[in-house]
Amino acid sequence: CGVVAVHGHPDAARQVYLGLYALQHRGQESAGIATADGKNLSNIKGMGLVADIFTDDVLNKLHGDMAIGHTRYSTTGDSALLNAQPIRVESTKGLIAIAHNGNLVNLGNVRSRLERDGAFFQTTSDSEIIVQLIAHSRAGTLVDAIADSLSQVDGAFSIVMMTRDRVFAARDPRGFRPLSMGVIENPGGQDTVVFASETCAFDLLRAKFVRDVEPGELVMVTQDGVTSRRFSSGVEQSSCIFEHVYFARPDSKIYNRWVQESREEMGRQLARESGVPADLVVPVPDSGVTAAIGYAAESGIPFRFGLIRNHYVGRTFIEPEQRVRDFGVKLKLNPVRNLLEGKRIILIDDSIIRGTTSRKIVRMVRAAGAKEVHLRISCPPTVSPCYYGVDTPRKSELIAANNSIAEIRNYIEADSLAYLSLDGLKQACDGEEHNKFCVACYTGEYPTQWVDVEDILPAAA
Ligand code: 5GP
Ligand code: SF4
Ligand code: MG
């Protein structure tokens, strides 16, 4: 998911709209914007893409100089509009709206305790737990109630929150998901403070990056300015490395490191670790492009766009009878036959999850006349599901959880297959920042104390 917040702008809704537009890649299922003007708190949500939901007419209904927004990542299961965000809850502490990126992991006991205390849940989303905890907190002030609530939940949360007159932003103590703070300077007036999941959103808002919200930090923005406090400390950082592999945009700086630099370095390292003689390096667009540029640069093998992506393939496209098995991939990708014919091709992609797409792409490249197809993946084998906000399928569906690399190579019908090593990946993402990363989907070792799979409600990343 993607989250955005704006404080102190006469048309906060349109600013959040622009931010969400830049974060559309983080979720296409639903989107919402809530605004506040000091007195009222409005909230509009819909299914689909940001630009389709928020027409001019809709934006005109959202008044106020504060706003938060959310774009939701596709998940299976529960009634989608019901779980769209921001979530708005009326409580003894007043109206609160929240937008959440990530997944909580100790839901079961917290939720049943709240229900015994009389909480009435509007959604099945894990994010509502945070608001209900705040609503039922015995802490005296709102900010104490928020800090108290955040210290009671475990898992991944980068959140933005809003009351009638304040904006909050917070990040879980391990810093699983990114969240950055920016500012739009207003000469002669109060600065506009903004928060976004990724810094690429700031460019569209003409906001200047200030800093990341720190793991375990709660930031509050009021008329009087920005204040900050810690609600937790003592656990080690475990920021999601998959943000650098796939999820974030290359033009974002995540955990103080440009995603573009990480990805290019993944490609370079991949070439050093598992080079193979070939004629062309070809990315699987878009996710493989930046790593492929690095691979080509390091290996000296020319880079070519041998696969073209159709950018107009919408999620709503209904396949007319699936008589042709490969139709889904063929709609999205098409080979450039004159480039591929008779060539030895190194295909670069970011990850293999189920293996079905990769197999179709390898077949497509071979059918276009490639002599050899070598697949190179810019991260290690995905062997375990994510419980922190990335919608990976269950273990039984992860091809690398149940098969050797040789068996996967055989299944996808590639001439050779190699993945980036875990050390290689960590080094590529590290730069000089010395971040500590979550790599659980590559190792099966989870950074939270326990993960009760049965407790995981439909993901609300
Ligand atoms: P597979 O071969 O596993 O069927 O598909 C691999 C492709 O899925 C890769 O191109 C990769 O970019 C993409 N991918 C990786 N992670 C995710 C994810 O979390 N969600 C979705 N929708 N696609 C992903
Ligand atoms: Fe990211 Fe993988 Fe950890 Fe999930 S399990 S947070 S995808 S590194
Ligand atoms: Mg891809």
Image (spheres, grey):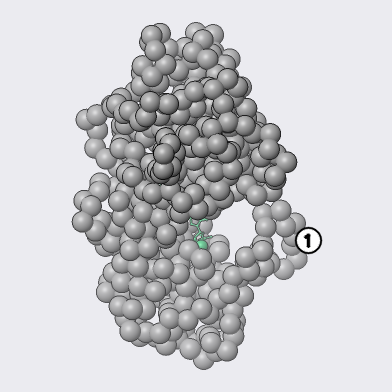
Report the side of 58 relative to 308 (left or right).
right
Callout 1 crowding tier (Cα within 10 Å): few <14, some 14–19, many ≥20: few
Q: Secondary structure at mark 1?
A: loop
Question: What residue is drawn where x is 22% and y is 30%?
Answer: 234
Q: Position of residue 369 (x, y in %)?
A: 56, 87
Residue 410: image location, x then y, percent: 47, 70
Q: Residue at x 42, y 35 (%)?
A: 190
From this viewpoint, is residue 24 visible?
A: yes
Between 112 and 138, the residue placed more toward the observer is 138
Depth check: give the residue in front, 310 or 9.
9
Q: Residue at x 48, y 34 (%)?
A: 8
Residue plotted at (53% across, 86% down):
340
Q: Is residue 277 above or below residue 353?
A: below
The reply, left or right, for residue 155 in relation to residue 391 is left
Residue 357 position by quadrant: bottom right
Tell me if residue 395 can be seen: no
Q: Residue furthest right?
A: 320
Q: How many marks?
A: 1
Q: Is residue 323 left or right of residue 192?
A: right
Q: Which residue lies under the disc numbered 1?
A: 321
Please tell me whether residue 306 is drawn above or below residue 330 in the rendered image.
below
Q: Where does residue 70 sit, x and y in percent of width and height?
A: 54, 39
What is the quadrant of residue 259 in the picture?
bottom left
Above or below 103: residue 348 = below
Mark 1: amino acid: Glu
